[in-house]
């Protein structure tokens, strides 16, 4: 392709679109750049639509055109967008969006439907008021009437047109339903009644069509399949309209009639799943059942009162209870049959019909559990509202809540449901046992991850439902649960599946059962013995017991029983025990975190087991293969190191020794590297200067992590800074040389990453304390140059705090370590870097703003807290060297900022601002600095004596005794008592002088 500009013509556009579909990356990139260059050319987007609508073109060209157009609608359709599509071009595109209702290709039609939805969201109803009427016209003319003799003159029944128009309507409704602006939802609600009436009629009609054809074999499977697709599309539209298109769905007679029909259909659909129906159509029937389930779920969540007040809602809930109960039976039976068997290498293929039916039923049972959870939410955790708009709405909510509480969520139902969950859904399934057998490590990982997937997986959902029921019926159900537990949790009971299930239940709600269950006795008498039973099936309990302990340790396991926990963990980590497979050991290791990471952790009870536990954890890290597993185990070791503090020293070498190989093995996996940096940080922090033996490794890891060349700096920088800070803090001054070599890598971090500025400056402050002379001599000017770029207009107070804190430390250190020479060097750096100018400019612009009033009033460029930070830095300079301060004032005077003397406006603003300084430390610092200025014996400070005495009166009681005596002595040396009184005191207001004298300093 040529590199010179190509004019936009239909022919050129088609050629570029053809190139954009190429597999050659170089051609594709050139084509993409050319398409991008046309984005601001008038007519480009409508030409893309021309290409899409031309069915004579190749599919790949049409695909590129519609995908590119969708991108343009996303970015440039809104009127306020940069390079927005012109009004005329938007009108042309919009006018032809519905012309693709005869598009034969499903994928192309879907992309156009997405565009229609996005445009409608932006332009309905103002610029596209007739979209719904046009779509309904197409739908009406495409859907055949029940009797072909009733065809209207303009009616041309077409299954394809009907499918496409329903898809367009679905995406429009989808977009309007998700609109957060109330106006968008309100516009949809205006159109919803007619939309619902038409689409519901087509849905009912087509369901009857395909049901009759499927049951009587009167039509081909393809004919049935077409109509299944249409009714499914209708159901998707109706579900969204019912929930979002009506403010009070229960008040619509049409909706209630439709609701009754769907209840009857739900049962018939379930029956058809069991009938001889072709698999392709059976899948679509199942999707109808799921679609109805989504309707019930969405309404129960979005309009809970409306759901409760719908006709026959008890029947709906009972139907789902029945499916959940029946499916639970099949689960329990399968679990019993699979216990003790080896994995079936060729069993359970995806195409097995029984497996398909089982997955169908599982999805329905899952929806049932979610539906009951929504009912519990409705009664026990209702959405709070400040105000009901109508009295009727409030009454409906009260009626719905009472109905759910008295008719649905009864104690009897809660009891039956909890029994169902514990005895059937909590029991390990046959496929669980097979997966465990085949790959213990993967199974252990996925088992942990399931907890967060409760909306999509039935076991986690069952656990959530159990916890909800136990929480809200705890007065009635806590003791019965404990009774069942006491009957099952005995050493004589060898039903490991039931035990695992009951232990799971008890672990889900420890806080509720704690008043009724003495877990300490159970731990000592039962669990400690069960982990030692060597029957093969007891590996199931070895997996469950550490999880159970981890759940209860935060609630009620006495400190004196912690050693038992560590003994159990030690036993379960023992690789030589054949029952302790990878799954058991991984679970035991990860559950150990719970016992360590809680406030009652006692290091003395843990120390006797540390040696062996560390050894087993090291072996386990070497044995596992998955990166996620290694990371979780490294986290456990890191937590142990953190909680052991200085006690980690004897074991540190073993931990450190595994880190370099792990670091190398992880390659580009930055998450794992972050974990390694974190654990090393904990060890260095815990060992203090004893960690010097690992300094070389620490320095190398820091260097790697912060170097831009490796490509991982973005991911590793934050953790590397944590390690860096720990290393600098823990290193004695005599051993600072290797760390000082890293300072050149630290400076760019300060310049590039504002999000980590505070952490970088903390490391710099650590360096200043570690090696003050080296840092000040080599990097003071560099740092002040960076600070100068940060200070000024728009600086936020939190950023100002960290920057000025660092400057304060540098000034204090220079004064303490290098004396007057150090202060002079630092003063010169402040001048040459622009820091001095920025500080004084901040004060001056604030003072200048305070001189204005009325309509022309100015406002300070920096806020009060930033100004306080500036005054702290100036205070440090004054306390460090009056000569340097005078030099800075002289430099600012030479700039000719204002005809008024610098000292005059500086003192005026400083004393005026003093009342805004809230931090006692800062107040004392400023008071000391202002008082030290008296040593200059200059008129501009002596005339401020009244203000200065006000400052003294406020803070002098907080000053240390020696400082107070020092400044009084200076006054005597300069003037003598009488001279001081005559020159200064006589000019002070008597009331202020009286308040000051009460301090009894003189």
Image (spheres, rainbow, N blue to C red):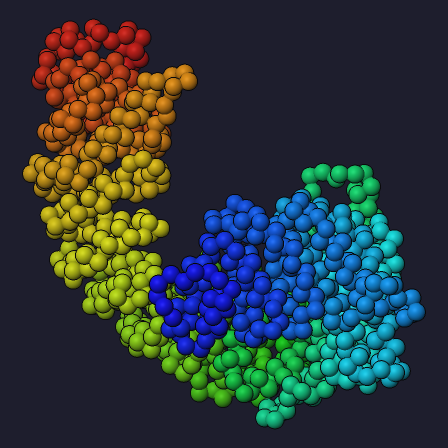
Q: Residue 764's spot in the image, x, y percent?
A: 23, 50
Identify the image quadrant of residue 675. Answer: bottom left
Identified at 51% across, 75% down, the residue is 445
Q: Residue 195's spot in the image, x, y percent?
A: 78, 55
Res 871 visible: no
Identify the image quadrant of residue 415. Answer: bottom right
Left or right: residue 939 compared with residue 19: left
Identified at 13% across, 29% down, the residue is 891
Of the pair 511 and 424, the residue shown nearer to us: 424
Q: Residue 251's spot in the image, x, y percent?
A: 84, 49
Identified at 22% across, 27% down, the residue is 928
Of the pair 249 and 675, the residue shown nearer to us: 249
Q: Residue 839's spot in the image, x, y percent?
A: 24, 33
Identified at 24% across, 54% down, the residue is 748
The N terminus: image quadrant: bottom left
Of the pair 110 and 896, the residue shown nearer to us: 110
Of the pair 952 and 26, the residue shown nearer to us: 26
Left or right: residue 478 compared with residue 883: right
Left or right: residue 422 compared with residue 722: right
Identify the image quadrant of residue 237. Answer: bottom right
Q: Residue furthest left?
A: 821
Res 835 visible: yes
Left or right: residue 892 compared with residue 645: left
The C terminus: image quadrant: top left
Q: How many marks?
A: 0
């Amino acid at each position: 392709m040529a590199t010179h500009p190509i004019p936009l013509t239909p022919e050129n556009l088609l050629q570029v679109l053809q190139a954009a579909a190429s597999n050659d990356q170089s051609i594709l990139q050139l084509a993409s750049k050319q398409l991008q260059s046309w984005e601001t050319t008038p007519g480009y987007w409508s030409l893309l639509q021309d290409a899409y609508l031309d069915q004579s073109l190749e599919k790949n060209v049409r695909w590129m055109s519609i995908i590119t157009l969708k991108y343009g609608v996303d970015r440039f359709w809104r009127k306020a967008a940069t390079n927005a599509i012109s009004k005329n071009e938007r009108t042309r595109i919009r006018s032809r969006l519905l012309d693709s209702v005869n598009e034969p290709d499903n994928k192309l039609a879907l992309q156009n439907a997405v565009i229609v939805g996005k445009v409608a969201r932006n332009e309905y109803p103002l610029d596209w008021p007739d979209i719904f009427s046009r779509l309904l016209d197409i739908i009406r003319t495409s859907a055949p009437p029940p009797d072909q003799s009733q065809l209207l003159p303009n009616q041309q029944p077409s299954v394809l047109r009907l499918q496409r128009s329903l898809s367009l309507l679905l995406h429009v409704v989808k977009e309007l339903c998700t609109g957060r602006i109330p106006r968008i939802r309100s516009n949809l609600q205006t159109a919803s009644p007619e939309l619902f009436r038409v689409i519901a009629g087509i849905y009912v009609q087509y369901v009857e069509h395909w049901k009759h054809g499927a049951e009587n074999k009167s039509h081909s499977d393809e004919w049935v399949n077409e109509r299944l697709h249409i009714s499914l599309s209708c159901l998707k539209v109706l579900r969204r309209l019912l929930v979002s298109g009506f403010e009070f769905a229960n008040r619509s007679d049409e909706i209630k009639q439709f609701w009754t029909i769907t209840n009857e259909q739900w049962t018939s659909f379930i029956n058809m799943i069991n009938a001889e129906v072709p698999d392709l159509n059976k899948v679509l029937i199942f999707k109808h059942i799921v679609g109805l389930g989504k309707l019930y779920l969405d309404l129960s969540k979005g309009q809970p009162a409306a759901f409760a007040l719908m006709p026959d809602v008890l029947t709906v809930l009972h139907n789902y209870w029945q499916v959940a109960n029946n499916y639970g039976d099949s689960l329990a039976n399968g679990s019993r049959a699979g216990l003790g068997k080896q994995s079936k290498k060729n069993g359970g293929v995806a195409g097995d019909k029984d497996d398909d039916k089982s997955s169908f039923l599982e999805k329905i049972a899952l929806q049932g559990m979610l539906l009951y959870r929504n009912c519990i939410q409705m009664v026990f955790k209702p959405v709070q509202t400040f105000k009901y708009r109508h009295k009727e709405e409030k009454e409906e909510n009260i009626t719905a809540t009472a109905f759910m509480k008295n008719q649905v969520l009864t104690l009897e139902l809660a009891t039956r449901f909890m029994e169902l969950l514990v005895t059937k859904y909590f029991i390990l399934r046959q496929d669980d046992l097979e997966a465990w057998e085949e790959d213990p490590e993967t199974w252990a990982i996925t088992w942990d991850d399931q907890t967060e997937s409760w909306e999509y997986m039935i076991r986690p959902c069952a656990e959530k439902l159990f916890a909800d029921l136990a929480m809200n019926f705890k007065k009635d159900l806590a003791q019965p649960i404990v009774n069942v537990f006491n009957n099952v949790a005995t050493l004589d009971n060898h039903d490991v599946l039931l035990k695992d299930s009951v232990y799971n239940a008890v672990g889900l709600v420890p806080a509720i059962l704690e008043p009724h269950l003495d877990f300490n006795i159970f731990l000592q008498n039962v669990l400690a013995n069960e982990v030692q039973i060597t029957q093969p099936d007891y590996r199931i309990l070895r997996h469950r017991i550490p999880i159970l302990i981890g759940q209860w340790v935060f609630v009620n396991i006495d400190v004196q029983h912690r050693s038992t926990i560590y003994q159990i963990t030690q036993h379960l980590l023992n690789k030589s025990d054949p029952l302790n497979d990878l799954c058991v050991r991984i679970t035991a290791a990860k559950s150990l975190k719970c016992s360590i990471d809680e406030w009652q952790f006692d290091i003395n009870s843990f120390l006797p087991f540390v040696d062996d536990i560390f050894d087993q954890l090291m072996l386990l890290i070497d044995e596992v293969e998955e990166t996620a597993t290694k990371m979780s185990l490294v986290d456990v070791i890191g937590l142990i190191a953190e909680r052991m503090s200085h006690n980690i020293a004897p074991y540190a070498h073993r931990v450190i020794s595994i880190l370099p190989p792990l670091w190398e093995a992880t390659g580009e996996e930055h998450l794992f590297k972050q974990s390694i940096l974190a654990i090393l940080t904990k060890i260095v922090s815990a060992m203090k200067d004893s960690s010097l033996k690992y300094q070389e490794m620490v320095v190398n890891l820091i260097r790697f992590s912060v170097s831009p060349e490796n490509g991982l700096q973005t991911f590793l920088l934050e953790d590397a800074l944590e390690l860096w800070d720990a290393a600098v803090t823990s290193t004695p001054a005599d051993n600072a040389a290797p760390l000082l070599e890293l300072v050149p890598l630290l400076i760019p971090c300060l310049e590039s990453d504002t999000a980590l500025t505070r952490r970088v400056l903390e490391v710099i402050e650590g360096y200043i304390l570690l090696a003050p002379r080296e840092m000040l001599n080599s990097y003071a000017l560099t740092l002040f140059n960076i600070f100068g770029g940060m200070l000024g207009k728009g600086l936020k107070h939190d950023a100002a705090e960290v920057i000025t804190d660092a400057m304060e430390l540098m000034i204090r250190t220079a004064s303490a370590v290098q004396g007057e020479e150090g202060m002079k060097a630092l003063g010169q750096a402040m001048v040459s870097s622009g820091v001095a100018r920025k500080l004084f400019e901040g004060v001056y612009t604030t003072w200048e703003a305070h001189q204005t009033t009325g309509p022309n009033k100015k406002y300070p460029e920096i806020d009060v807290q930033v100004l306080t930070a500036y005054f702290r830095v100036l205070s440090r300079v004054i306390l460090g060297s009056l000569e340097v301060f005078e030099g800075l004032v002289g430099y600012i005077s030479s700039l000719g900022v204002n005809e008024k003397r610098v000292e005059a406006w500086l003192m005026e603003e400083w004393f005026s601002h003093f009342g805004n300084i809230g931090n006692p430390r800062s107040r004392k610092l400023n008071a000391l600095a202002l008082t030290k200025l008296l040593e200059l014996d200059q008129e501009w400070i002596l005339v401020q004596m009244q203000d200065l005495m006000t400052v003294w009166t406020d803070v002098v009681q907080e000053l240390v005794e020696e400082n107070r005596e020092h400044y009084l002595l200076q006054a005597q040396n300069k003037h003598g008592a009488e001279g001081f009184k005559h020159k200064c005191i006589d000019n002070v207001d008597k009331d202020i002088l009286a308040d000051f004298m009460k301090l009894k300093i003189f």
